[in-house]
Image (cartoon, rainbow, N blue to C red):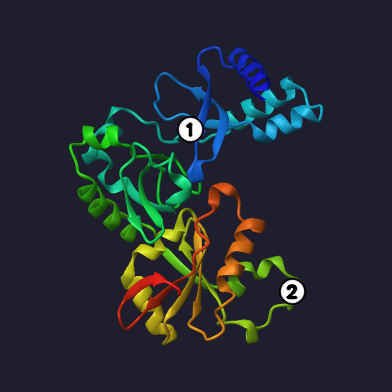
Amino acid sequence: MEEFIEKLRAVLQDRFPTKQIMVNNTTKVNDVTRAGIIIRDDNCMLSPILYCDGYYGNYVEGRTLSDIADEIVRLYNELPDDRPCVTEELLDFEYVRDKVRIKLVNKEKNADFLKGKPNRDFLDLAVVYYVDVSCDEDDQLIYAFTIDNRLLSRWEMTESELYEVAYDNTLRKSQFVIKDIIDYVGHMFPCGSLGDDERGFMYVASNKKLNYGAVYLLFEDNLKSFADELKSDLIILPSSVHEVLILRNREDRENLKEMVSVVNRDNVSLTEYLSDSVYIYDREKRELSFLS
């Protein structure tokens, strides 16, 4: 694929003579390395990355480089004119203070991704920090960059100080939602095939954008409130980095961990995987722990 990417880079450089077109290998969540092409404008430090996996598959199947480049040019030109552009301002902590957020990733599977980045342990997960520079809270396009130790040093902050700010921002800005799974997936099934008698079995917790919504787990007051609403301890299944599934506590729970593992293996992409663990929230002790 390296030869294909270099050829595509050269074609795109001809299409964008005033921009820098660069090949970039990025370590994503769960230490998945993806090859991409960056289209960089000298006036902007935040540049879109076009991942090449799908285009390479098209190329192998006979699609021409010119046709692929045409599509990339079209997609780039369709980006909103008011998309955020990282400038020196975004390296100033006071400017980005309200934009700092938290996400949860699997600790073991992110050994490389976590290197050089401030983080902290949470169960078998890791708390990671990023700056959300989306235009507004309702913007469905996510513009963000992960905070690394170099940036933290520039800000002259400790990880604990960063956590306090990011925790508060995430709680205030995330617009967490909990839906009955029937409402969440009902559109996938024939009309009427899922009835009201199936409601109340399982719920989906995320945020309005469905982006790194599994961070819901960090906010114990939210867990307590929902546990009190259901009048039950909560069993929590980490569906992906974007959402978690919640059930009332139950006796027949010996197969839950196996179910989570199977679903993760068969239905969750490598970059969205969170954990094979099952958690339980004790509403009396107000504690989240591993289900034994």
* 237 versus 78 height, above or below: below
Quadrant housing residue 52: top right
- For this view, does 70 lie left or right of residue 91? right
Q: Nearer the viewer, residue 113 or 51?
A: 113
Instruction: Give the residue pinned by disc 2.
Output: 191
* Amino acid type, callout 2: Cys
Residue 221 placement (x, y as % from top left): 31, 72
The residue at 72%/20% (across/down) is 66
Disc 2/disc 1 C-alpha distance (Å): 40 Å
Residue 223 placement (x, y as % from top left): 37, 73
Do labels 2 and 1 touch, CB within 8 Å?
Answer: no
Q: Nearer the viewer, residue 17 or 22?
A: 22
Circle 2 or circle 1, nearest the eye: 2
- For this view, does 122 lie left or right of residue 97? right
Q: Is residue 141 visible?
A: no
- For this view, does 38 lie left or right of residue 107? right
Q: Secondary structure at mark 1?
A: loop
Residue 81 numbered mark, or none = 1
Q: Quadrant of the C terminus?
A: bottom left
The residue at 39%/58% (across/down) is 174
